[in-house]
Image (cartoon, rainbow, N blue to C red):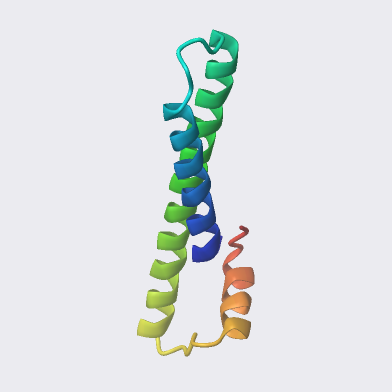
């Protein structure tokens, strides 16, 4: 998953957290539970995305250490396909 996607998920998480803070105490428990589940789901997606980015970065670093040039997007896509990294 691209860094832009992680940023988008972090923004979504932030928006959901802000929404949750602004909820009046009169909100039914069921609605509050739904929002809490959404926030938790987005938080997990952000964490998974960050792990994927770290894994891809480690693989790219290993390829560079092995002498391969992985500087362009086309080559990056090839590396991703070669290693079976699906986002």
Q: Position of residue 22 (x, y in %)?
A: 45, 28
Of 48 and 79, nearer the camera is 48
x 55%, y 25%: residue: 35
Q: Is residue 7 above or below residue 26?
A: below
x 48%, y 23%: residue: 23
x 41%, y 90%: residue: 67
Of 3 and 55, nearer the camera is 3
Quadrant of the image occupied by residue 30: top right
x 55%, y 87%: residue: 72
Q: Which quadrant does the C terminus fall into?
A: bottom right
Q: Position of residue 80 (x, y in %)?
A: 58, 70
Of 78 and 2, nearer the camera is 2
Residue lying farthest left?
65
Of 36 and 41, nearer the camera is 36
Q: Is residue 17 above or below residue 87?
A: above
Q: Is residue 56 above or below residue 14?
A: below
Q: Which quadrant does the N terminus fall into?
A: bottom right
Left or right for 62, reference 11: left
Q: Position of residue 59 (x, y in %)?
A: 44, 70
Q: Is residue 66 above or below residue 16?
A: below
Label tally: 0
Q: Position of residue 68 (x, y in %)?
A: 46, 88
């Amino acid at each position: 998953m691209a860094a832009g996607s992680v940023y988008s998920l972090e923004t979504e998480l932030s928006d959901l957290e802000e929404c949750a803070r602004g909820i009046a105490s009169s909100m039914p428990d069921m609605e509050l539970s739904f929002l809490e589940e959404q926030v938790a789901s987005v938080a997990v997606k952000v964490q998974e995305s960050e792990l994927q980015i770290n894994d891809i970065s480690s693989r790219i670093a290993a390829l560079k250490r092995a002498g391969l040039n992985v500087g362009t997007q086309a080559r990056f896509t090839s590396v991703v396909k070669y290693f079976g990294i699906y986002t």
